[in-house]
Amino acid sequence: MYTIHMNFAAYIRDRRETLRHHDRRYSVRQVAQRIGVQPAYLSKIERGDFAPPSEEKIRLLAAELGEDSDVLLAMAGKVSQDLQAVIRARPRLFADLIRQLKDMPDDAILRVVREVRDGDW
Amino acid sequence: MYTIHMNFAAYIRDRRETLRHHDRRYSVRQVAQRIGVQPAYLSKIERGDFAPPSEEKIRLLAAELGEDSDVLLAMAGKVSQDLQAVIRARPRLFADLIRQLKDMPDDAILRVVREVRDGDW
DNA sequence: TCATGTGTATAGTATACATTATACACAAGC
DNA sequence: GCTTGTGTATAATGTATACTATACACATGA
């Protein structure tokens, strides 16, 4: 049992079961088929017997379950490749920025996001 | 030959050779020993025959060669685990921020960094 | 009761990652 | 001429990642 990823495992199981309550199409089998894996594999993942799947499968799973893929990836101990590419393109700049913001409260970061979005940057 | 990483390969070879010009302690053998790998391994890496090493070794190499480890990691196609941890801790916030800044010019990002550092955030 | 759907156990695999160990040919310095 | 240092060729390995394929026992519904 990959205890490290129990959060991810438990979370997606819970999400899927909740959806299944209203819609039979959210069985392990059907979800597995839609995201393109074997049912046994998804089952093991949901039980925490296997580590979370690849970024691609996590993305499909997120879409399927109506979840935020960045959050699901984070739970799986991963960071989206597209974000990593942005950082790699300008490592010094982004490394500084991220380390700078590391210990800032959420609302401070949110303010930066908003100002960058709306402002005359 | 791992062509994808020729930049990394060529770059560290060049840096090491430059240092070696003034200091015999920068031979493949001695650098390899100081960062804790086999000389043949470092040689292959510098020639682009092998992919870049682990984050840990890249860090040691950066320190050894007086380079920025984030830059070297970027050249190796990696993003520092400590930065990834910051993102994973608050994925929505940081994902938004980074995607927001993706296409901004360097000086705009630098301004954010400075304002966060100096300002009354 | 018989087909269908459910989750899951077991076993195996292909590929990549991160390296080591040994040995060799060449060159320089003493 | 001999030791020492240089880079490098060759071969192999352990571990992790990301899955597949098969088969089974239980439950449900017609």
Image (tube, coloured by chain):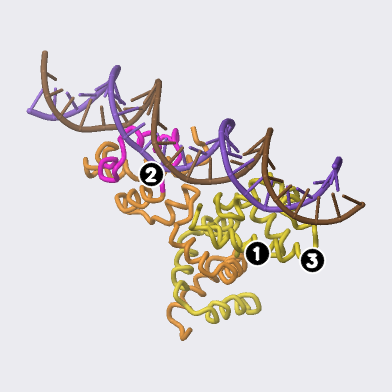
Chain colours: A yellow, B orange, C purple, D brown
Mark 3 and mark 1: Cα distance apart in space: 13 Å
Which residue is located at x 57 percent, y 81 percent? A111
Looking at marks 3 and 1 on the same chain, the residue that comes earlier in the sequence is marked by: 1
Q: Is residue A113 above or below residue A67?
A: below
Which residue is located at x 46 percent, y 39 percent? B51
Dot 1: element: helix
Q: Which residues are magenta?
A: B31-54
Q: Nearer the viewer, residue A106 or A74?
A: A74
Decide whether residue B49 is among the magenta residues: yes
Instruction: Provide residue B93's location: percent of width, then percent of height.
Output: 58, 72
Which residue is located at x 61 percent, y 65 percent? B99
Q: Which mark is residue A22?
A: 3
In contact (CB < 8 Å): disc 1 and disc 2: no
User: Which quadrant of the figure has residue B104?
Assistant: bottom right
- Amino acid type assigned to the residue bearing label 2 in the image: Ile
Seen in the image, is B91 located left or right of residue A26?
left
User: What residue does disc 1 label?
Assistant: A14
- Amino acid type assigned to the residue bearing label 3 in the image: His
User: Which quadrant of the figure has residue B90?
Assistant: bottom right
Q: Are marks 2 and 3 on the same chain?
A: no
Q: Is residue A90 visible?
A: yes
Q: Is residue B44 above or below residue A6?
A: above
